[in-house]
C-alpha cells in the first residue's frame, strides 16, 4: 500500500458498513509509526501524496433520504483514510442493486457519475 501511487477500494455495503474482511485489512495497515504517528499537535497521517478511489455497491440507496443515517461505510472509509493522510478521495456509488426499477440502471448511472477531466 505504501508503495502504491493510487489506492482503489471496491466494496459492497454489508449491514450498513464495510465487510469484516476489509475492516481487518484496515486494522492491519493503520498502524502507529507506519501509516500515522502522534506528534505534539496530535495524529499525523504518513500516507501522503496518494489518490484514493472508493467504488461502493449497495442494495439500497444510502446517499439519499430517508437512508442517509444508515450510510456508515463512506464516512467511515473517508475518516480512516484521512487519518492516515489520504485526503484526496473520490467515491463512486453503485446504488439500488437490490431494488427493481433501479437495479437495471445502477451500474450505468454509477459510470455516468464519473467525471473524467
Ligand atoms: C450480508 C449482506 C449484507 C448486506 N447489507 C446491505 C445493507 O446493509 N445495505 C444495503 O444497501 N445493501 C446491503 N446488501 C446488498 C449489497 O450491498 C448489494 O448486493 C451489493 O450490490 C453487493 O455488491 P456486489 O453486487 O458487488 O456483490 C447486503 C448484502 C449482503 C450479502
Image: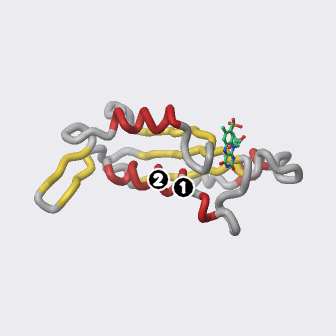
Seen at 32% across and 34% down, the residue is 2
The quadrant in which the N terminus is found is top left
Q: Nearer the viewer, residue 64 or 8?
A: 64
Counting every numbered tag in the picture gives: 2
Seen at 70% across and 68% down, the residue is 66
Question: Quick check: which quadrant has ligand 1?
Answer: top right
Q: Nearer the viewer, residue 112 or 104?
A: 104
Q: Position of residue 77 (x, y in %)?
A: 47, 49
Seen at 37% across and 37% down, the residue is 27
Q: Which mark is residue 72?
A: 1
- Spatial separation of the CA atoms under disc 1 and disc 2: 6 Å
Q: Which mark is residue 76?
A: 2
Check the image and report above or below for 40 versus 24.
Answer: below
The secondary element bearing badge 1 is classed as loop
Q: Residue farthest to the front? A: 15
Image marks 1 and 2: residues in contact by CB distance under 8 Å: yes
Q: Residue farthest to the left? A: 40
Asked which colour scheme the image uses, the reply is secondary structure
Amino acid at each position: 500500500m505504501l508503495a502504491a501511487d493510487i489506492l482503489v477500494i471496491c466494496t459492497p455495503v454489508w449491514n450498513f458498513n464495510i465487510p469484516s474482511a476489509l475492516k481487518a485489512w484496515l486494522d492491519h495497515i493503520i498502524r502507529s509509526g507506519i501509516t500515522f504517528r502522534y506528534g505534539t499537535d496530535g495524529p499525523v497521517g504518513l500516507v501522503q501524496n496518494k489518490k484514493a478511489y472508493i467504488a461502493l455497491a449497495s442494495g439500497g440507496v444510502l446517499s439519499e433520504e430517508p437512508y442517509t443515517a444508515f450510510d456508515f461505510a463512506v464516512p467511515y472509509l473517508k475518516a480512516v483514510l484521512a487519518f492516515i493522510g489520504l485526503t484526496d478521495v473520490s467515491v463512486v456509488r453503485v446504488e439500488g442493486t437490490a431494488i427493481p426499477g433501479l437495479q437495471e440502471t445502477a451500474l450505468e448511472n454509477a459510470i455516468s457519475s464519473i467525471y473524467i477531466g
